[in-house]
Image: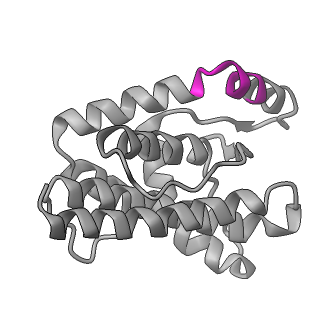
Amino acid sequence: MDEQTKKAVHSIFQAAERNRAACEKLAGNPEMIGPRVTLLALAIELYLKALLAASKMKYGGLHDHSDLFKRLPPKTREAVRARYDAEVTKPEVAVKIVEVAMKLPPGVNLELDFEKNLAKGSRAFVKWRYSYEGDLPSMPTGFEICEALRQELISALPGLPVIDTTGDRFILLTQAG
């Protein structure tokens, strides 16, 4: 990887890390769910752009997570999906999923599909910034998507400016249907 590409990837990754870390620091405060979701959605977008930059792929003014993901090389997409599957099946995450599922009101379910949740993330960034307007989308397993993207970058590009994780995760619910 040439020096210019390396600097670009590092810069984008560092911005993603800051947003993810800020999201984690707001964990446990229900009043901060809007800012948390907004920060998480932005981190996901930036991790996707870092992966694209590392692959010398163009992303222009795109912000949609699904569109960005589709631009990644097939091998990278497969690796990220595998990391996501590994994340959602980790014992500590699976326990949280079961805990949340047991408390669900009628008509509400958890969505674990990678593609569906990736698409929800793009809408979450815009909608949760304006949470006072109502009609909020959920962003289930958003943190697991974020972590899968993050780990793919860390694995593929040693030496990135990593910010320690607190491990504070959350799963939001989605309406059935």
Name which quarter of the figure residue 151 lies in. Answer: top left
* Quarter that holds the C terminus: top right
Residue at horizontal 80 percent and vertical 56 percent from the top? 27
> At which x and y percent is residue 98?
77, 23
Question: Which corner quadrant holds the N terminus?
Answer: bottom left
Residue 123 visible within the image: no
Q: For the point 21% across and 74% down, which residue is it? A: 60
**What predominant SS class does the magenta segment belong to?**
helix
Horizontal relation, residue 174 to residue 5: left or right: right
Residue 7: x, y in percent?
27, 69
Residue 17 percent coordinates (x, y): 52, 61
Q: Residue at x 67, y 68 (%)?
A: 135
Q: Which residues are magenta?
A: 88-96
Viewer-nearest residue: 116 or 95: 95
> Measured from the top left, where is residue 82 in percent x and y?
39, 26
Question: With respect to residue 53, does 4 lie above or below?
Answer: below
Relative depth, front residue between 6 and 55: 6
Name above or below for residue 133 compared with residue 138: below
Foreground pick, 123 / 171:
171
